Amino acid sequence: MEKNMLGSLQEYQEARFTKRVAFQKGESVVFVLNFMPGQQLPAHQHPGTHVFILALEGTGTVTADGTAYELRKGDIIHLEGDETFAYVNDGQENASLYVILTKTPGPEYAQNV
């Protein structure tokens, strides 16, 4: 068994959003993305994976294949890896997203940024 503390993964920086890896096992990775107001995750894909996102804190907008969806604390979404998606914290408070990627496409996806 492994244990991690959510608080240690919620780190915010003014320069850019942060990504803190909680676990990386086999072809899956679990991490937390942290955004200050106005910060965003650019549009991208994760081919060959499934993406599961739980909004831990704050509010924002996920755009998936050109359609915008509000994401609030407690919301859970699933994205297919070939869907192009982006996120922006368009709220007034910090936002954190708990992300699970299955079948991680490459080792670079399991690194802190």
Image (tube, rainbow, N blue to C red):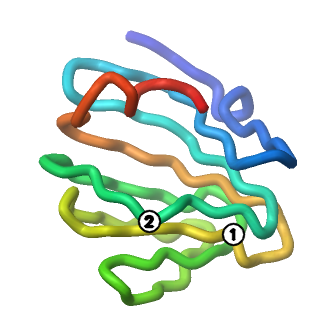
Q: Position of residue 36 (x, y in %)?
A: 79, 58
The residue identified by callout 2 is 43
Say which element carries label 1: loop
Q: CA distance from mark 2 to mark 1?
A: 14 Å
What kind of residue is marked 2? Answer: Ala
* The quarter of the displayed image where residue 29 is located: top left
What kind of residue is marked 1? Answer: Asn
- Closer to viewer: mark 2 or mark 1: 2
Q: Is residue 35 above or below residue 28?
A: below
Q: Is residue 20 left or right of residue 15?
A: left
* The quarter of the displayed image where residue 41 is located: bottom right
Q: Is residue 21 left or right of residue 106?
A: right
Say which element carries label 2: strand
Q: Position of residue 50 (x, y in %)?
A: 21, 52
Outermost residue to the left: 48
Locate the C terminus by quadrant.
top right
* Residue positioned 69% across, 69% down in the render: 89
Task: Please tell me which of labels 2 and 1 falls first in the chain.
Answer: 2
* Residue positioned 32% across, 23% down in the render: 107
Q: Is residue 52 above or below residue 23?
A: below
* Residue positioned 73% across, 33% down in the render: 7
Alpha-carbon neighbours of circle 1 within 10 Å: few (<14), some, or many (≥20)? many
Q: Is residue 78 above or below residue 102?
A: below
Q: Is residue 113 above or below residue 55?
A: above
The residue identified by callout 1 is 89
Locate the N terminus by quadrant.
top left
Outermost residue to the bottom: 67
* Residue positioned 82% across, 46% down in the render: 15
Q: Nearer the viewer, residue 18 or 100?
A: 18
Q: Position of residue 20 (x, y in %)?
A: 59, 31
Q: Position of residue 42 (x, y in %)?
A: 52, 62
Q: Which mark is residue 73?
A: none
